[in-house]
Image (cartoon, rainbow, N blue to C red):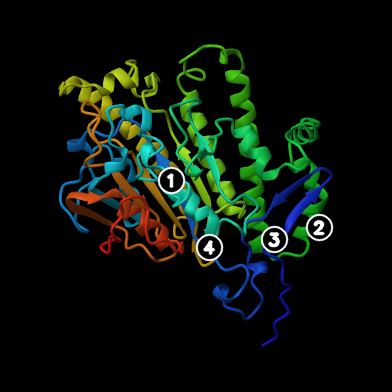
Amino acid sequence: MFLTKKFLSRRAVLRGAGASIALPLLDAMIPAGTALAKTAAAVKPRLGFVYFPHGAVQQYWTPNGTGANFEFSPILKPLEPLRDYVTVVTGLRNKGGESSDPHGIIEETWLSCVHPQDRNVATGAGITADQFAARQIGQDTPLPSLEICGEPGGYSSLSYRTPTQQLPMEINPRKVFFEMFGEGDTSTERRQILEQTGSLLDYTQEATASLSRTLDASDRATVSDYLDSVRAVELRVKKLEVSTASLTNLPNAPLGPSDDFTELLDVQFEMMALAWQTNQTHIVTFKLANEATMRTYPQVQVTDAFHPLSHHGGDPEKYVKLVRIQAYHTARMAKFAARLKGIKDGDGNLLDHSLILFGSNMANSDLHNNDPLPQALIGKACGKLKGGQHVHYPQDTRHSNLLVTVLQKVGVQVEKIGDSSGTLAEI
């Protein structure tokens, strides 16, 4: 047998004047006759944390049954087509997030399980799980981590690089796009470069044509599909900019017409997919909306502001509206997960190689408590996660143990986060 296949570097990019576009993993990046796991192109697990505010109505979040034969609840129903990739985890408590001012600390303690008063620079107490990961598995990518959101402001970031330094969460997908793909020493230079034509792809046409001549049909199709998705994101970002430009001075107002929030969330999720597909970063943290948000959700026939509605007082009519909002958030997550499943990545797809914690740091929004938290894991973590099950833990099982478990599943060597006492072997 003759092995004549040319080897393309995993770090190969399409370059043009003032722009570069990273490439997805191609067959040509795997030397002929070499196992993928033994090459520089070996698949690395992607880690995501996706946060939604105001907890969940427990009886509509918690599945019926445990183990593999559980039934998806109304809030989790959008994830049912991805059953094999879903692990619902119930019964966890985050004592570090409990406070008489719950909205004030609820966001910043989800991934640290450390009360702000207990942050400690000397011991590192207060560093969030995503940033533990960034230190260990985020250093071989252009961006150690990426922090994005669907709503500006809020009480805090989800991410703390140190016990006292929080990382800003970017709401503007165009800025996220520039950060991943634009060149230039400053953001001003990158903006000037891109605004000349408005598209990175226009700068890389020659490089794309040259690369295509060296690839087989399968890789050419992969590159073509990938660049089509880049172009689509550019167009969606431009559309969002136009629709939101006139509303920037309206406090506590939706970013645009009723369907714009859906578009914004979907574009931000697409940024996650592109970042992972092109190996720009392995770690993304995404806050869908803020605690105490006054956003309304007319796209699911809810015109009440989310925060006042979350103080439901056990009112069945308010439950109906809350479930619509919470299922809406799940639907955005499910669409993203399905997108990952459709993206080839080495010997599988991106969802096979991802682990995403989808959840909230609040339980009953009317009581502002942190027990039991609504949490779900989505993805297979390169075969390290069983998937397709509902795991229920006894009262007071520590949420921090889940964080340690998640990090260890993706290869982060960490023994303790917050008040953790071990790992959760069942997942």
Precedes in sequence: disc 4 or disc 2: 4
* Amino acid at dot 1: Asn
Q: Residues within 10 Å of mark 1 (few under 14, many from 20)?
A: some
Precedes in sequence: disc 2 or disc 1: 1
Write down the residue under mark 3: 11
The answer to whether the residue labelled 3 contacts the one labelled 4, judged by CB atoms less than 8 Å apart, is no
Q: Could you tell me which residue is drawn at 35 percent across and 39 percent down?
A: 115
* Amino acid at dot 4: Lys
Write down the residue under mark 4: 44
3D distance between C-alphas at marks 2 and 3: 17 Å
Describe the element under mark 3 as helix, strand or loop: loop
3D distance between C-alphas at marks 4 and 2: 28 Å
**Residue 310 relative to residue 315: left or right:** right
In this rendering, the label closer to the viewer, 2 or 3: 3
Write down the residue under mark 2: 210
The answer to whether the residue labelled 2 contacts the one labelled 3, judged by CB atoms less than 8 Å apart, is no
* Amino acid at dot 2: Ser
Q: Could you tell me which residue is drawn at 64 percent across and 34 percent down?
A: 175
Describe the element under mark 4 as helix, strand or loop: loop
In this rendering, the label closer to the viewer, 4 or 1: 1
Precedes in sequence: disc 4 or disc 1: 4
Precedes in sequence: disc 3 or disc 4: 3
Q: Residues within 10 Å of mark 2 (few under 14, many from 20)?
A: few
Q: Give the x, y percent position of residue 88.
A: 27, 50
Q: Could you tell me which residue is drawn at 49 percent across and 64 percent down?
A: 348
Write down the residue under mark 1: 120
The answer to whether the residue labelled 4 contacts the one labelled 1, judged by CB atoms less than 8 Å apart, is no
Precedes in sequence: disc 2 or disc 3: 3
Q: Give the x, y percent position of residue 396.
A: 19, 48
79 or 106: nearer the viewer: 106
3D distance between C-alphas at marks 2 and 1: 53 Å
